[in-house]
Image: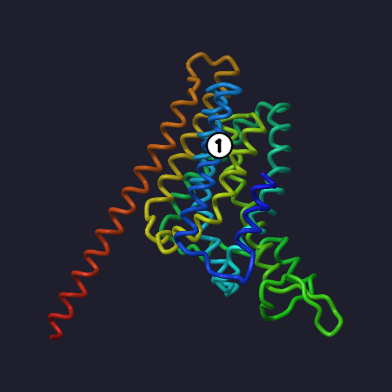
Amino acid sequence: MLVVLAFDLWIVDRGEPREFSPRQASFWVGFYVTLAVLFGVALWVLVGPTSAGQFFAGYLTEYSLSVDNLFVFYIIMSRFAVPKVHQHKVLLVGILMALVMRGGFIAVGAAALSNFSWLFYVFGLFLLYTAVQLVRQHGHDEEEEVKENLVLRWARRALPHTDDYVGSKVIVKVNGRRMVTPLLIVMIAIGTTDLLFALDSIPAIFGLTTDAFIVFTANAFALMGLRQLYFLLGDLLQRLAYLSYGLAFILGFIGVKLIAEALHSSGVSWAPEVPIWLSLSVIGVTMVITTGASLIKARRDAREGKHITTTASAEQG
């Protein structure tokens, strides 16, 4: 994984900084998705279909939830006025920071769940609460949700920084004094904000598998493809009108699954044990329906907007 990321960084950052084209983004999204599929197939061959199914279900869940992160990443980039030629580097470093922090989070979560089985009920209720909040907040201004966290506030206060960007540099020397540039501040913002999003995505994937290795690799593959997805989706992000509903349904389903399986493990006979193939099917079908409905709505809205504009022009004429 480190070799792949180093290769990615070398390919993208060699030469002069440049904008990420949709063609490049499409290639890299396809590359990382293909890697994830090959990894899942290898799990199937070497370990078995159950582990492979858990990985694919976890990967789909994490990738789906990560799409919601992109809205906030877009706002952070706009707020800090990050030049487009440097956005890919900001996202890569920020996501690498998030991956390291998530690794620690996953290790603690796996250890806690193996020692305190009642935490499954807590995780399940938390996911149900998060699902309700997603539905309630649908349509609200995303800007309201982007607040500086404790780490970011500390960084802005404690680290001497320049007012403007200095190319792609994160540390510069000004009048003999080392200072960080806003680029580092944005990287910290991206990394720590993604960790906050992990507060619901990590419990969600633990609802599908308690294997820490599968949890981490599913997170890693989802995050590795997230940066390119940011450039590929672009304005399409604003058109995914029903994304929150789809994510809320997935979180709610996994929350119910967690509670049901915890009851089943406790000896409650009527509580069902949800098979991984059913989880994978529900997650996949939900995202297909959500995306399809969102694109149909966007196309219809665009058509109606064009009709209104044409009618108004005709009346003015």
In this picture, residue 147 sits left or right of residue 295: right
Q: Relative to 149, does residue 195 appear above or below in the rendering?
A: above
In this picture, residue 124 sits left or right of residue 104: left
In this picture, residue 64 sits left or right of residue 83: left
Q: Residue at x 41, y 50 (%)?
A: 243
Residue 160: x and y, percent?
A: 79, 75
Q: Residue at x 51, y 13 (%)?
A: 269
In which image quadrant can residue 55 be found? top right
Which residue in the structure is indicated by mark 1?
125
Q: Judging from the image, what secondary structure is the residue with disc 1 in?
A: helix
Quadrant of image for the N terminus: top right
147 and 282: which one is in front? 282
Residue 222: x and y, percent?
A: 56, 45
Q: Relative to 19, does residue 28 appear above or below in the rendering?
A: above
Residue 65: x and y, percent?
A: 51, 47
Tag 1: residue type?
Leu
Residue 242: x and y, percent?
A: 37, 51
